[in-house]
Amino acid sequence: MKGNNMKNKLLLSTAIASVAFAGFASAETKVGGNLEQTFNALSTNSAATSSRSFGAEHNIKLSSKKDLDNGLTAKYGFTAEGDSTFAADSHYLTIGTDTVAVAFRRDSGINLSGSAVPYIGDAFDTAAFTGVSQGSSLINASDVHDNDYAAIEAKVMGGTVALQYAPDVGNQNADDSDVGEGGNSATGLIYKGSFGVDGLKTLIGKTSTDGEGATDDTTETQYGFSYNFGQFTVGAEKSAQDVAGTDTDTVIYGGAVAVNDNFTLGVYLLDSDKEGEATDEESKMVQVGYNLGGLGITVSYAENENVNYSNGADSEQIQIHTVQKF
């Protein structure tokens, strides 16, 4: 009897060791990354908020893929973003098939911070951000993907649909054994794809954060599309936010043309209407992009009116953005 107990303990120990060291199984790992540098110059009709600055971001990306013994496939990876700690900025683990998978993510996967509008460089909330408020209506206050979340993801209708759940909003940098503080939860239902139509690109979804009775829920609904025909691409997007009982509707239109294989030109318009404000925020932006063969460069010029929905508060911004991938 004693021998059987010892044998069972040995088998259990072996099973635990097998699970603990499963990560050492042979799998191909890919390494990549990029270096982005920017120059921003902002001019406003208030000299106190005018500025000029350089910026840089560097990322190292690792990804891997492994066929499991049960016939499923595991895909996993992370991005370490350059700062004082070089900490992992985003990560993911998906387990499933080519059709459906369960995913555990942060700052990865499909989300409403993306856009179907055919930008050449950064979107309005970055390339036209004044540092005061412009673009605030575009920042997804209820977006799930900035937090650690779980999702069910399925390939359908020429794209991907994801049902997402973050149990603790704000729990973004927990260790693998940490327990969250039990904050508000967030959910999302998002589709990104073509619906099977060549040249069509869509991003549709809704995210929400539970106010837990203390405050109103925060919700955002977004509809966006673009269509490519030849060298031309046109698109539009509408975002409707409800934050603390205040509605904000933002509409963006854009179009881009590939002049040749290396040079692209785009024009974009934004109008943001916030409940209770007498004026709308409005922006116009022009972008040009050029591929130098190993170095991509974009230049964005934006004119913003009624910044922070304040009549007569105007600004201009130019951004030069370079990207090198390795």
Image: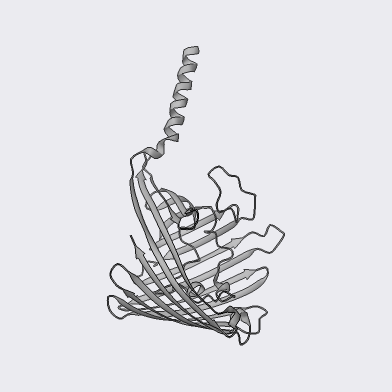
- Closest to the observer, 227 or 265: 265
Whether residue 297 is situated above or below residue 161 in the rendered picture: below
In the image, taking residue 219 as reference, residue 269 lies left or right, namely left
In the image, taking residue 225 as reference, residue 278 lies left or right, namely right
Whether residue 325 is situated above or below residue 291 in the rendered picture: above
x 28%, y 79%: residue: 260
Quarter location, residue 271: bottom right
Image label count: 0
- Closest to the observer, 124 or 273: 124
For this orientation, the residue located farthest to the bottom is 312
x 55%, y 52%: residue: 173
Percent coordinates x, y for residue 105 in the rendering: 48, 53
x 36%, y 73%: residue: 297
For this orientation, the residue located farthest to the right is 214
Quarter location, residue 166: bottom right
- Which color scheme is applied? one colour
Q: Is residue 278 visible?
A: yes
In the image, taking residue 80 as reference, residue 312 lies left or right, namely right
Percent coordinates x, y for residue 27 in the rendering: 33, 43
Percent coordinates x, y for residue 163 in the rendering: 51, 57
Q: Is residue 1 visible?
A: no
Quarter occupied by the C terminus: bottom left
Whether residue 171 is situated above or below residue 113 in the rendered picture: above
- Closest to the observer, 45 or 4: 45
Whether residue 229 is situated above or below residue 212 in the rendered picture: below
Quarter location, residue 59: bottom left
Percent coordinates x, y for residue 124 in the rendering: 49, 75
x 43%, y 27%: residue: 14
